[in-house]
Image (spheres, helix red, strand yellow):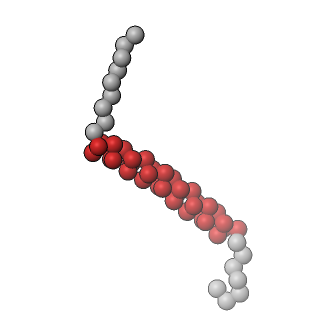
């Protein structure tokens, strides 16, 4: 059996955490924007707008 030791230095670990958080927030923003756009297509305009 082979034993593999992996080392992630603090700089790389911090960068990896930032990439994961940015990806999650980017996906959330994309779906929120898409949902608001779809809702606006089916929403009736109020009088005077």
Q: Residue at x 38, y 50 (%)?
A: 18
**Where the C terminus falls, by quadrant?**
bottom right
Q: Residue at x 72, y 75 (%)?
A: 44
Does 35 sit above or below residue 23? below
Give the side of residue 35 with respect to residue 25, left or right: right
Residue 28 placement (x, y as % from top left): 53, 56
Give 20 or 2, whichever is nearer the viewer: 2
Residue extending farthest bottom = 48
**Where the N terminus falls, by quadrant?**
top left
Give the side of residue 8 with respect to residue 37, left or right: left
Residue 14 placement (x, y as % from top left): 33, 47
Image quadrant assignment for residue 36: bottom right
What is the tally of numbered marks visible in this picture? 0
Residue 42 placement (x, y as % from top left): 70, 68
Image quadrant assignment for residue 6: top left
Q: Residue at x 64, y 69 (%)?
A: 40
Does 12 sit above or below residue 35? above
Give the side of residue 20 with respect to residue 43, left or right: left
Residue extending farthest top = 1
Give the side of residue 3 with respect to residue 43, left or right: left
Does 18 sit above or below residue 8? below
Image quadrant assignment for residue 7: top left
Residue 27 placement (x, y as % from top left): 51, 53
Q: Residue at x 43, y 47 (%)?
A: 20
């Amino acid at each position: 059996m082979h034993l593999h030791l992996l080392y992630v230095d603090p700089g790389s670990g911090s960068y990896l955490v930032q990439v994961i958080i940015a990806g999650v927030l980017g996906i959330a923003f994309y779906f929120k924007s898409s949902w608001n756009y779809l809702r606006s297509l089916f929403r009736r305009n109020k009088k005077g707008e």
